[in-house]
Amino acid sequence: MKNFCAFLRGVNVKGTNMKMADVCKVFSDAGVDNVSSVLASGNILFQSEKNTVELKSILEKAMSEHFSYDAFLFIKNEKEINDIFRNDPFIAIDNFHNYVFLGSEKVEQTLLEEFEKASKAEGEQGKIVNEIFYWQVPKGQTLDSMFGKILGRKSFKDKMTSRNINTFEKIIKKF
């Protein structure tokens, strides 16, 4: 059995509300084992013998049917999550958030292009490391920055989700 985390897109924001206990039950009913959640933002830990592609298909279908919404989730295994955390190119700085973007193939290139076009707050940075886009932004500027506003576009809805790097640390501790 391998350890995985599914990162759900758009959970408990903008009217898509669900209890993590209900989400965990949907995952269990879909055939994965040892299901638990980290935070209320849709980070679901589980174990399975299946591969990521199979799991994405099965779990998105189960979530969509149960909650009557278009479920988008991105699945990473334990090694990938550890690598993402370890490869954060930005040191932790007081008054700044470090974000990680997970998504479909090549979304990191699109994110970098959008980031480079956007005006930036002092100290705001974006960088790709091993096909993962990382973003460091002053606290309080996440949704107000030009790049932050771009992230809400409908064209990104099924292509990516983001998490604070601290979420990855919590997930790693719970594996």
Image: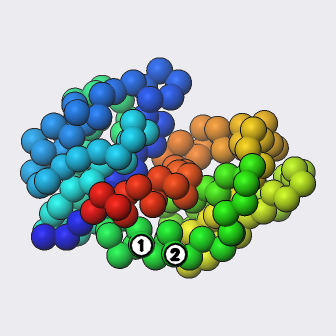
Q: Amino acid at mark 2?
A: Arg
Q: Residue at x 37, y 63 (%)?
A: 172
Q: Amino acid at mark 1?
A: Asn
Instruction: Give the quarter of the figure containing the C terminus.
Output: bottom left
Of 169 and 51, the residue lying toward us:
169
Q: CA distance from mark 2 to mark 1?
A: 6 Å
> Residue 113 placed where, x, y %?
76, 62
Q: Residue furthest front?
A: 94
> Residue 80 placed where, x, y %?
40, 73
Are circles 2 and 1 on residues that touch, CB within 8 Å? yes
The number of discs equals: 2
The answer to whether residue 36 is above or below residue 78 is above
Coloration of the structure image: rainbow
Q: Label 1, on which residue? A: 82
Q: Label 2, on which residue? A: 86
Secondary structure, mark 2, is helix
> Residue 151 placed where, x, y %?
66, 44
Q: Residue at x 60, y 38 (%)?
A: 154
